[in-house]
Amino acid sequence: MYVAVKGGERAIQASLALLEKWRRGDKDLPEIAAAQLVSQMGIAVDRVMAEGSLLDPELAALALLQAQGDVLEAVFLLRAFRACLPRLVRSQPLNTNSMTVARRISACFKDIPGGQLLGPSADYSQRILHNQIHSRPVLPTPSEQGISAGQPLARVTDILAAEGLLFSPEEQAQGPHDITRDPLNFPAPRSARLQALSRADEGFALSMAYATQRGYGDTHPFVGEIRAGWVPICVRLCDIDASVTDESEVAIGEIFLTECEMLTQFTVQLTQTEQAPPAFTSGYGLAPGRCERKAMSMALLDRSLRAVELGEPVTAPSQDQEFVLAHADNVEASGFVQHLKLPHHVDFQSELSMVKNLRDIAHRKAPNQDERSE
Amino acid sequence: MNPAQLEPPFAYLDSQTKRMIRRALLKAVAIPGHQVPFASREMPLPYGWGTGGIQVTASIIGPQDVLKVIDQGADDTTNAVNIRSFFQRTTGVATTTHTEEASIIQTRHRIPETPLRAGQTMVFQVPIPEPLRWIEPRAQEARRMHALRDYGPMQVKLYEDIAQHGEIATSYDYPVMVNRTYLMSPSPIPKFDNPKLHRSPALMLFGAGREKRVYALPPYTDVKSLDFDDVPFRIEQWNEACAICGATDHYLDELITDNKGTRAFVCSDTDACAKRQQS
């Protein structure tokens, strides 16, 4: 007779032991230190921080190591970790005009005030795998002189806006929505959409953005500007301690960000003002770390999701808030897809009973048709 | 930041978060069957593994509680073992496999066979809290339908099942009306368990972590499974009895016991099965 399977606890322990053995790999090789990842695999660390919504390179690197390089699993580890951190203070809005840029380009103008600055980029490299150290190309000694000293750089969109060539939406009266404190509800305000996109899965954002370029909600985009660099984070002491009356801002550190503004197709049919002359519209992308692909995808999607605001027909998935935002989070998506691995035998049993029952009904209706299976 | 500095608080979540969830639960109890949004947190178990139920349990559990965790009716399935060990680790509360002894029972996909009593709390893990999801995938539109009690399309779907198959073809997550007001998903329990929701003396709490919703059935709430006057609601029935305890009134899992496809039937509720064996 069948004896129900027991011992789930021991099986789990044994499975974890095996996982740890496979994670550690060949013990003749030295274990990778988290600091090495931070230093030499910074873009992977940046992605884990961006999608994990926690700025801590050391912890992100630890998560990557624990997850054997599985980026989504590392993101999940970081999210679960941040879930029990207290919220101490809300910073002042970051001002990316004051960014110390490591890179700044525009595809719309040959030259822009402050100049084009390639910075560290593989864009104009030949993608040849350097399979041996000596096959690496000989390069000049890098200088960091290209990096701006932190003087404010006007944004391309600001320049266009000053000429009235860019449609500027009305300022929102209330402060930004925070989807980690108030769940996303639809229709979502733009600040909630931007936050959701900023920590969206890079692959999902990329493919949805790509679809807009292939005609599913095209927006005729141009890269107005991409800039990446360090921005100071400021807080007001009175926001931390209620007994302090001083409202002046104090810089508590800086954060490396990548920002992208897409200039997109112009609009004449604005809902608010009938008389508005044609002007460009824009989409905005911003995420922590070096994440140009993500920031560009986000800017394209932000613009697509403004379809309703700009009076455009919603025809493509990329223009549909619920389609994009409800499926963009990889911690949610990965968990729910993989939960199908959990036992479902009770539900399957009721489906099994149901199918047999329906077959009986069908058989009674047409007894001859099913004879060969009897 | 040094991870060693950050020992998680009692039941993992910080007290602010637990208070926020309890507030949502109070609202849910006040409006039976209505889905209340809450700011779900990422738990150390994946979404889809019961994060909604875990957050509900974490926000109501106290040091005096006795916790039972089941998955598919059983205390010893891997996910139940894992969730139980999570709460043992983060709360140190007593755990049990006996339904009568538990003050909180967290469950995935079953309600115990042993009748519940007043003072007990059931916590359901819910994947899709919206009963209208398969009829209307848009949350905005579904919310409007609830507001107007526009539940005709659900009855039409059930009618189409009868027209096509001769019977309502929904076997689990079978929709119910709560207090004749709100249409509610009972979570993916088999419809066999639906009658146990009706006027239960226990408090029933439902948590959907990924979908960020909680809802509730206060004790003794009217819960009716949808049906038609001429096609009444019916639960699953087996011609067999449990191969271990001989029960004929328990939900049975079908097992394939050899390569020839021989079948055996055993109770899904391991605690009720063991109790019947002893008596």
Image (spheres, coloured by chain):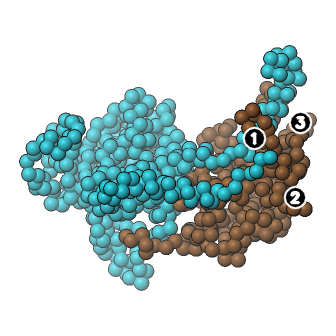
Chain colours: A cyan, B brown
Q: Earlier in the sequence, mark 1 or mark 3?
A: 3
Q: Write down the residue under mark 3.
A: B231
Q: Position of residue A333 (x, y in %)?
A: 52, 46
Q: Write down the residue under mark 1.
A: B257
Mark 2 residue element: helix
Q: Quadrant of the N terminus of chain B?
A: bottom left
Mark 3 residue element: loop
User: Comparing marks 2 and 3, which lies closer to the viewer?
Assistant: 2
| Picture layout, residue A122 above or below residue B72 | above
With A40 as the anchor, is B126 left or right in this view? right
With A62 as the anchor, is A365 left or right in this view? right
Amino acid type of disc 2? Arg
Amino acid type of disc 3? Val
Q: Write down the residue under mark 2.
A: B276
- Residue at x-position 28% and y-position 59%: A36
What is the spatial separation of the Cα atoms under label 2 and label 3, in whole angstroms? 34 Å
